[in-house]
Amino acid sequence: MGVSIIGWAHSSFGRLDMVDLESLIVGVSRGALQDAGVPAGDVDGIWLGHLNGGLVPEIFCSSLVLQAAPALRWCPATRVENACASGAAAVYAACDAIEAGRARIALVVGAEKMTAVSGPEVTQVLASASYVPEEAAKGLTFPGLFGQLAEQYFGRYGDHAATLARIAAKNHANGTRNPWAHMRRDLGFEFCNTESERNPRIAGPLRKTDCSLVSDGAAALVLADDAVAAGARRAVRLRARAQVNDFLPVSSRDVLGFEGPRRAWQRALADARCAVHDLSLAEVHDCFTIAELLTYEAMGLAAPGHGGDCLLDGSVHAGGRLPVNPSGGLKAKGHPIGATGVSMHVMAAMQLTGEALDMQVKDASLAGVFNMGGAAVANYVSILERTK
């Protein structure tokens, strides 16, 4: 039994002071059902990707999706959490139900309201997604953790500060073409590559422009089995998907090896019977620019230590051989935790159906999605293709 995306919706990402979590969830849920042309009463199950952890008062929010339509009452609804990969985790849980024959139509929502608490509070909540005894309890935040990764990378392969700046500049340039992006401003390489009052050092060699944004936002998908998808106006099939989890403590592994992401990419590509260079585009988890750099190498685009070559030869830029993060990625689009993985699948589906507006990659036929929780701990890779 296959699974296809037959509809979607996406809110603006950013600091949405006048919008609460419920409104975000309800808005994209209604939008996705309308886009798919699916009556709410036909939905067999609901999965909500949502981290929370203290970002909002609500800790029991799965049934907020039912507020989108009276006919959703009595529909099973489950909140799914796997750190920054909560969105992809929700997508995969819905896929499991459809593939098992337990559901024909699933509504998947990803949502997060992050800006209602202070910056330090957000940092603390996110730090709690690390291995607390060795990391958060000792004051290590995720900027600090990825700053250490960048330091280790530089120590092993040389100073790549300019490489990270090229990633940031690329994604901000892409973000100018994304109407849903948190930051639609082209910052340019020189600004991203220069430490300044407006671009201070955050942790290790990472500057502000190397860090993703704290955002509010939501996205939703309608997934369907083959029979339902055959009658839909368009369908994007999940040709393959893979989840790989690694040890939580950073001390238990060589994080620079990005082995969890590498194995997830290898499994998904093998199951899809394709190679990385067969992809038309990829949406990947650039929570920090060093993460995107390591992802190039995990995908097989470059050998370890040579990910920067993908930027120098233009292959991952818009118009290149394999554009990475044409949406602007987490860096420019924003990173409302629970929404991120769902948003990536929405953006990829839009590309494959030719509905990506100014972001459109020419002749897109196959897309890769990589959503990551923690420092390469929970790793999800999807390969998507349009079938209708």
Image (cartoon, rainbow, N blue to C red):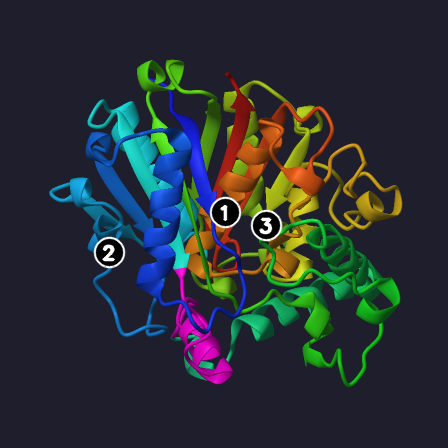
How crowded is the residue under tag 2: few (<14 C-alpha within 10 Å), some, or many (20+)? some
Residue 113 painted magenta: yes
Q: Residue at x 32, y 18 (%)?
A: 228
Q: What range is drawn magenta here?
A: 112-132
> On screen, 191 above or below 318?
below
Disc 3, disc 1: CB below 8 Å? no
Q: Residue at x 81, y 36 (%)?
A: 320
In primary-sequence order, the first of circles 2 and 3 is: 2
Residue 177 in the image, given as x and y percentages of width and height = 71, 49
Give the label on residue 258, or none. 3
Nearest to viewer (mark 2 / mark 3): 2
User: In the rendered image, which quarter is residue 342 located in?
Assistant: top left
Give the label on residue 64, or none. 2
Q: Residue at x 61, y 21 (%)?
A: 274
In primary-sequence order, the first of circles 2 and 1 is: 2
In primary-sequence order, the first of circles 3 and 1 is: 3
In which quadrant is the N terminus drawn?
A: top left
Tell me if residue 41 can be seen.
Answer: yes
Residue 341 in the image, given as x and y percentages of width and height = 47, 48
Residue 43 painted magenta: no
Q: Amino acid at mark 1?
A: Ser
Observer-nearest residue: 311 or 105? 105
Nearest to viewer (mark 2 / mark 1): 2
User: Does residue 182 appear left or right of residue 187 in this picture?
Assistant: left
Whole-number angstrom distance, CA of label 2 to CA of label 1: 19 Å
Q: Amino acid at mark 2?
A: Leu
Residue 139 in the image, given as x and y percentages of width and height = 49, 83
Question: For mark 1, what is the residue?
Answer: 343
Q: Amino acid at mark 3?
A: Phe
